[in-house]
Structures are given as structure tokens and as C-alpha cells.
């Protein structure tokens, strides 16, 4: 892979024919992409886990009376099938957290529990997605999947996805390319 082919800071949009249950009808943000592989976070699969349950795991000292009343409305997403016990928060760059990585000027990835506590208190970033697990690809694996037309890719524009319901993010990401996913063939092939 050469550096100009990196999909870092891109959205991967699963093609309609994707039969992998982990990625069918998903949109995935690529956090890192090098010769060694790629790491991303799925943005479109809500889990049956509440934010309150995540909070109870990471901050047992926070008193329930202190928790913001909106905490029960915060969705938790499946970031990917790898290490689902690990949490990730993808967010806009507000606040100082113990373990954060600036992905772009407008997007940060935090893995420390202090951001979860801050969100629970209503003191978190303006825009964020809380995820468990991540998606990973070995060296050249993502390139092979791209060559097989498994994915569409587009430079990430998270501003159009933050407040979009999870079930609409797949098509919303494709809208960035001007593509209606319902009009694409479910068969993968090459001309």
C-alpha cells in the first residue's frame, strides 16, 4: 500500500450484497490504515446495552443522583467484532481526556473512562458516539476487499452523521457519494 491509497479518515460503506453479518448495511469510520492493516469503528449498529450499564462498569463511584437525566437516551454501538469488552468514544474535540488521539482537527478517539463519566454528568463533548469493540483488517486485507467491490469509500464527513439515526447512516454516508444504495446490484463483479 502506498500512502496515497490510505483510507484513514474515510467512511467505508458496505455494498448491498455484503453477506458478512458483522458488516451488512454498515458504515465504518477508518481510524488508521497502514501497510500493517487497518482499524475502524462501525457507526451504524446499536447494541442492546444501555449507556447506564457501560457507566456502571467504568465508574462505580458516580452516584445515580448526579447522572444527567438524558443518560438513558444515549445509545451504545457495536464498534466491531474485535475486543467487544473495550470501549471507544468517537467525538468532536472538546474536553481533555486521559487517553485521546486526534484523528483529524475535528475528530478525536478516546479510550479512557473519564469521558464516559463526563458524558453521564452532561459534561462531555458536543457530538460523540459510544462504541464497544472495533473492526480490524490485516495487512492488504482491506485493499483486497476494496478490489473485490465489497466496500464503497468516501472521505469522512461526520457532520452529516452525528445526529442521524443509526438505521439511516448507511444511506446517509452513500449520499456523500451521490449513490442510492437501493439502486445498486447485490451481485459483485468486475467489468
Image: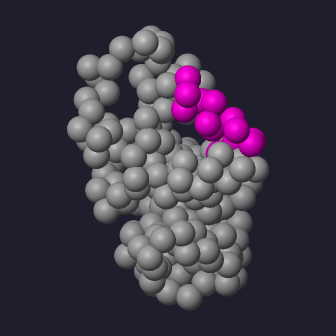
From where the camera sits, is residue 48 visible?
yes
Residue 122: quarter of image: bottom left
Q: Nearer the viewer, residue 101 or 56?
A: 101
The vertical placement of 66 against 31, above or below, is below
The vertical placement of 10 against 88, above or below, is above
Task: Give residue 26's position: percent from left, percent from top.
Answer: 47, 37
Left or right of 51? Residue 185 is left
Task: Give residue 80's position: percent from left, percent from top.
Answer: 63, 45
Task: Give the residue at x 45% y 48%.
Answer: 11
Left or right of 143? Residue 24 is left
Task: Give the residue at x 60% y 84%.
Answer: 97
Q: Nearer the viewer, residue 124 or 20?
A: 20
Task: Give the residue at x 53% y 61%.
Answer: 130
Task: Give residue 190's position: percent from left, percent from top.
Answer: 47, 14
**In the image, which residues are magenta?**
134-148
Q: Is residue 138 magenta?
A: yes
Q: Is residue 135 magenta?
A: yes
Quadrant for the C terminus, please.
top left
Amino acid at each position: 500500500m502506498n500512502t496515497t491509497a490510505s483510507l484513514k479518515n474515510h467512511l467505508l460503506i458496505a455494498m448491498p450484497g455484503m453477506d458478512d453479518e458483522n458488516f451488512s448495511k454498515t458504515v465504518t469510520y477508518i481510524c488508521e490504515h497502514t501497510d500493517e492493516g487497518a482499524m475502524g469503528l462501525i457507526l451504524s449498529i446499536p447494541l442492546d446495552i444501555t449507556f447506564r450499564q457501560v457507566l456502571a462498569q467504568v465508574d462505580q463511584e458516580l452516584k445515580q443522583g448526579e447522572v444527567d437525566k438524558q443518560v438513558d437516551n444515549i445509545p451504545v454501538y457495536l464498534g466491531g467484532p474485535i475486543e467487544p469488552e473495550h470501549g471507544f468514544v468517537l467525538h468532536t474535540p472538546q474536553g481533555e481526556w486521559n487517553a485521546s488521539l486526534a484523528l483529524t482537527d475535528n475528530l478525536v478517539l478516546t479510550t479512557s473512562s473519564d469521558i464516559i463519566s463526563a458524558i453521564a454528568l452532561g459534561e462531555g463533548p458536543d457530538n460523540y458516539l459510544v462504541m464497544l469493540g472495533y473492526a480490524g483488517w490485516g495487512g492488504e486485507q482491506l485493499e483486497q476487499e476494496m478490489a473485490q467491490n465489497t466496500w464503497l469509500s468516501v472521505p469522512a464527513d461526520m457532520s452529516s452523521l452525528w445526529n442521524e439515526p443509526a438505521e439511516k447512516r448507511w444511506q446517509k454516508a452513500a449520499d456523500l457519494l451521490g449513490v442510492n444504495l437501493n439502486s445498486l446490484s447485490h451481485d459483485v463483479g468486475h467489468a
